[in-house]
């Protein structure tokens, strides 16, 4: 797997991720369990977005400095931006499922932060492994692109069909294998009930969040490889999009009903990207055009959601 990124940029990215996780797990942990308001979520969301854009600027400079080509630097920077936007968009659908899980299990808002923090760690590890494996497969077997493309098209069709429908949360393997207490015991995953150690509902939530991470990783990894085959761009855009997932969840949780059509837009994006992958050897869509189409679909979907929300409420 070849990458245009120099070794020092890899090291810089690793430091950024470790420092970010330190802030999330150590500094914010001192706050304890507390409700995260819209203002706090918005501020942190902006922090993660700005951090990602600053990193993209550093990436642009590194490519230009190592190759001497401004055009190549612009192309690679656009690939990162497009990949980041797509992963961020797909994360929105992930967040809606998290919201459904938390609502179903009546998870207190001040406990949700810990669940999301653990979910982010799992998502980073899982996606790193899948990205490296996916990159190796693409390098060795070019025809895998067509498999990825067909998979994305089918996923998009399935997402369109399932939009607005609630998944069956009762169909969870963990519930069948483990006894679960009827009430929470703080932020504990295990508790003592009738003299025996059993799982708490919070453990069930963690299992479902982990399962969701697996499902969405399978969807999103092929999508980013449709933009670029450079493992550095794939990994960094993916991980940086995930780092802001917790803050974005609390932000979107407050306004989720306003963008109820967003899943349809994401379905169209997946079908479009899958089609692009299947046609890669016939026609290669310019990255800037691809970015414009993705932004246009998201903007149109959000606009239609906002404009039609009052009518939906009346019904």
Image: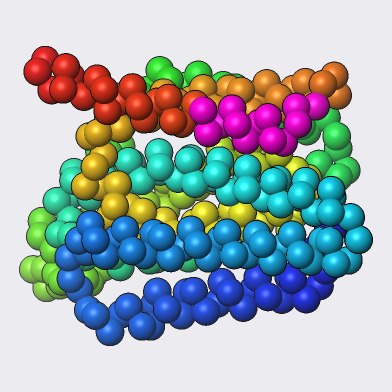
Residue 57 location in percent, x, y? 66, 62
Q: Main secondary structure of the magenta part?
A: helix
The vertical placement of 289 against 192, above or below, is above
Residue 249: x, y in percent?
32, 52
Colouring scheme, one of rainbow, by chain, secondary structure, one colour: rainbow
Residue 25 visible: yes
Q: In which quarter of the image is the C terminus?
A: top left
Q: Can residue 152 be seen in this view?
A: no
In percent of width and height, residue 22 lies at 46, 80
Looking at the rendered image, the quarter that the N terminus falls into is bottom right
Residue that appears at 28% across and 84% down? 30
Up the image or down, 138 lies above or below 158; here it is: below
Number of marks in the image? 0
- Specify start and end residues of the magenta stretch as a single range: 284-296
Q: Residue lying farthest front?
A: 70
- Give the left or right position of residue 312, taking residue 14 as reference: left
* Image position of 221 (left or right of 229): left
Return the x and y of residue 12 as percentages of the image width and height.
68, 75
Residue lying at 68% horizontally and 21% vertically, measured from the top left: 275
The answer to which of 40 and 227 lies nearer the viewer is 40
Q: Does the magenta stretch include residue 204?
A: no
Q: For the point 45% across and 45% down, which residue is it?
A: 91
User: Is 116 placed left or right of 157 in the picture?
Assistant: left
Q: Which of 164 and 190 is in front in this view?
A: 164
In the rendered structure, does residue 285 fall within the stretch colored magenta? Answer: yes
Looking at the image, which residue is at 52% across and 54% down? 241
| Observer-nearest of 136 and 80 | 80
Quadrant position of residue 237:
bottom right
């Amino acid at each position: 797997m070849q990458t245009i990124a120099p070794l020092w940029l890899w090291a810089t990215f690793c430091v950024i991720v470790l420092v970010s996780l330190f802030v999330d797990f150590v500094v914010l942990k001192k706050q304890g369990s507390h409700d995260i308001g819209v203002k706090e979520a918005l501020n942190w969301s902006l922090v993660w977005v700005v951090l990602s854009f600053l990193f993209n600027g550093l990436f642009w400079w590194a490519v230009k400095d190592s190759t001497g080509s401004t055009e190549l630097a612009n192309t690679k920077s656009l690939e990162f931006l497009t990949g980041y936007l797509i992963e961020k968009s797909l994360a929105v659908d992930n967040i809606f499922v998290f919201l459904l899980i938390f609502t179903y299990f009546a998870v207190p808002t001040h406990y949700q932060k810990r669940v999301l923090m653990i979910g982010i760690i799992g998502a980073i590890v899982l996606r790193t492994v899948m990205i490296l494996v996916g990159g190796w497969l693409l390098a060795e077997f070019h025809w895998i692109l067509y498999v990825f493309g067909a998979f994305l098209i089918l996923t998009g069709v399935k997402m369109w069909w399932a939009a607005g429908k609630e998944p069956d949360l009762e169909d969870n393997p963990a519930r069948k294998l483990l006894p679960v207490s009827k009430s929470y015991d703080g932020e504990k995953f295990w508790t003592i009930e009738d003299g025996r150690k059993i799982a708490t509902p919070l453990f069930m939530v963690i299992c479902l969040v982990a399962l969701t991470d697996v499902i969405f990783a399978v969807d999103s990894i092929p999508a980013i490889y449709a933009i670029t085959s450079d493992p550095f761009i794939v990994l960094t855009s993916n991980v940086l999009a995930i780092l802001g997932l917790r803050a974005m969840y609390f932000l979107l949780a407050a306004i989720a009903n306003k963008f109820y059509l967003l899943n349809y837009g994401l379905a169209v994006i997946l079908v479009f990207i899958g089609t692009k992958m299947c046609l890669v050897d016939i026609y290669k869509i310019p990255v800037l055009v691809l970015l414009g189409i993705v932004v246009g679909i998201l903007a149109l979907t959000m606009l239609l959601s906002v404009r039609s929300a009052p009518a939906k409420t009346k019904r």
